[in-house]
Image: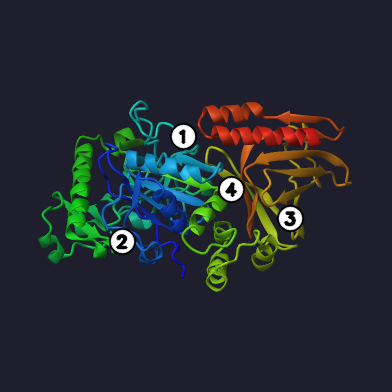
Amino acid sequence: MNDDATDGTAPAEATDDTGEGATTVRVRGIYTTALTRLLAETDDHRVVQASPPIRERFDAAFPPEPADASVSTTDDRQGVGVVGRPAGVASVLDRLRDAGRDALAWRDPTPRGAVYAGEVTETLGSGAVVALTDATADSAAETDPLADVSVAGRDPTGFLPYGKTAVHVETGDRLRVQVTDPSAPWTGGRPVLDTTVHVHGALGSLVRGGADSGSTLGSTDPQLADLLSTEPPDGWETAWGRDADDADLDALSATLDRASERASALDSALAGADPPGEVAPACYWPGEVTAWVWLGRESRFGLDDHRRSVTATMTGHHRIKAGTDRASAAVDFVEAVCPDAREAFPFDAVTRQFGPAEGDSVRIEHGKPDGRSFSLGEGEVTSRDPDGTVVVEREMSGRGTYDALDVDQQRGDVAVTKLTEGNWWYPTVYRGEDGEKRGTYVNVCTPVEVFPRAVRYVDLHVDVVKHADGRVERVDDDELDAAVDAGYVPDPLAEKARSVAGAVENAL
């Protein structure tokens, strides 16, 4: 039974921000069982709107009432998104970051529901790139419960599909848009925009303009509407979600009350706003707070422990599920037929079955502490050790220099990178076309994960290099210090990085 299967990212309804009482949380995705257990370990959170398999697994009802925050697995399974009002999101983030030292969190500068005056900067085959602005810029640090959560380091732009606008758009056009589908910062994707304005919710949403707006959401059930004491504001239409079928009338009325309050406030914000042509890029409405948590290897294994306290969980459950759909299905099968499987993480079996194998191509996905990620390039796996190591060989471009080694790249240079599952560091040896060693660069990072198509980690700035003449040098401590000061790297993670760098330096 795959009761942690992703069933879509759903936003949360708003609640007041008084912080009184337990935060209600809706959870979906491959981490659901573990996160439900993690959140339930304190009196500060109460899970609602649980799926039938989760209700069966925990033997609990989990009322279908509105949520203060919604947690859902990202499409690439590398982490989760958290959406809701500030107090609810802040409370959930505090708990999620307890999963492990390598659970890193960022606030999204383009949150779900934010409404902008945007400017089209580029037109593509299927849509337009729209310049936005940072919706978090006006937050009052002294009152903002997410003041300690750093904003992801990426440009605030969005993608407007041509099907989401009734008019033809060209570069330079300015128009009003809303974020409907945020994007995790490490994916490199842009949030998806729409020209129709919604107030989103998991139990129900409101659509500005109603049926004539072009929205693809469902419409109001007339019989249901007659039973509720609240009606949406003029100009808005209700669209009930799937979970509304299980909710009682009190929960539906509360959902509609809260959504209507937000819709009225949004109407007021737009009523007095300058037109996009005069102010773009600008933010009309900040939407719901949206944050992202990247889960590293240590955090995934920590969530295994929480899940294991509820149901049979093999070692590496979440680590394997984060790889591919096939790997995720295999985990469900193993746990169904061998519920007591508790051996060490089966790296050899996983990579033999799903990759990478010798001869395969993999990307080295280099995450940054500010949430961004980029590829160091794709290389060929030249060897695979059953104990957890793969060697990846890349041909260099012959342009630029090797960081910290102060050596120019040359055509024919080769980078040989040795990546060991679970290590907090990995070395890359650069050699010339003649085989002569040009230097060694040891990257200090969160524990390495060798997935079928990519190797992933987050770079922790501080590194150690060994020059061709044998000199050993530790570099970029100042960049790690700056990342700590900016809130991107928590102190325990920074301490670990410095310790690893010191050990590597001594070993070289």
- Helix, strand or loop under label 1: loop
Front label number (4 vs 2):
2
Q: Inspect the image, locate mark 2, and give the three-letter code of the amino acid beneath it.
A: Ala
Front label number (3 vs 4):
4
Q: CA distance from mark 2 to mark 3?
A: 46 Å
Answer whether labels 3 and 4 touch (C-beta < 8 Å): no
Q: Is residue 52 left or right of residue 79?
A: left
Answer whether labels 3 and 1 touch (C-beta < 8 Å): no
Marked residue nearer the N-terminal end (1 or 4): 1
Residue corresponding to mark 2 = 61
Q: Is residue 385 visible?
A: yes
**Looking at the image, how many numbered discs can be counted on the residues?**
4
Q: CA distance from mark 1 to mark 2?
A: 36 Å
Residue 309 position within the rendered picture, expressed as x and y whole percent measured from the top left: 49, 57
Q: CA distance from mark 3 to mark 4?
A: 19 Å
Q: Quadrant of the C terminus?
A: top right
